[in-house]
Image: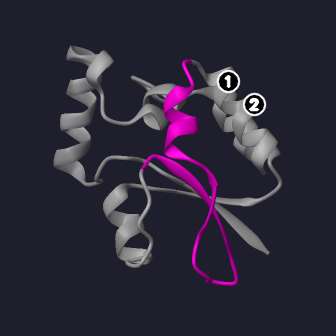
Amino acid sequence: MSTLIFVYALDGGLFNGITHYAHKILSPKTYGCNLCAITNNMLGTKREWAEFIKGLGSETQFLHRDEFKQSYPNAQYELPAVFRVTNHEDPELVVTSTEINSCRDLSTLISVVRKRV
């Protein structure tokens, strides 16, 4: 069984979460993670994205950059990105940072992810 891992281009943690939240409000055009910017609003995960993820039929994980690097220290990729992991092997890149960053709305991101997985 494979797992899809969606990796944000930002570090996790309480302080970082508060900082990211403020940044999204004060300067959304310079926010550092397009995956987060497109899939979340100020109240959390957008309903359409949550429904899409449920419908994928795959196990999914959402990791921050620091969490991903801790789990896969040899993986050197630009983030945000989407990976597939099978049997605890090295992650396989399925949606690149360039592809995610070129998306301007949720429907485009969903289309890109759907084509790749």
Residue 88 found in image quarter: bottom right
Q: 82 above or below 71?
A: above
Residue at the spot x=31%, y=47% of the render?
10
Residue 114 found in image quarter: top right
Q: Position of residue 55 (x, y in %)?
A: 81, 44
The residue under label 1 is 108
25 or 105: nearer the eye?
105
Residue at the spot x=31%, y=62% of the render?
66
Residue at the spot x=62%, y=23% of the render?
106
Q: Which mark is residue 73?
A: none
Residue at the spot x=51%, y=26% of the render?
38
Residue 37 found in image quarter: top left
Q: Count of labels shown?
A: 2
Q: Position of residue 54 (x, y in %)?
A: 75, 45
Q: Position of residue 23 (x, y in %)?
A: 22, 26
Is residue 75 rendered to the left or right of residue 13? right
Q: Position of residue 67 (x, y in %)?
A: 37, 65
Q: Is residue 27 magenta?
A: no
The residue under label 2 is 111
Give the residues in magenta. Answer: 79-104
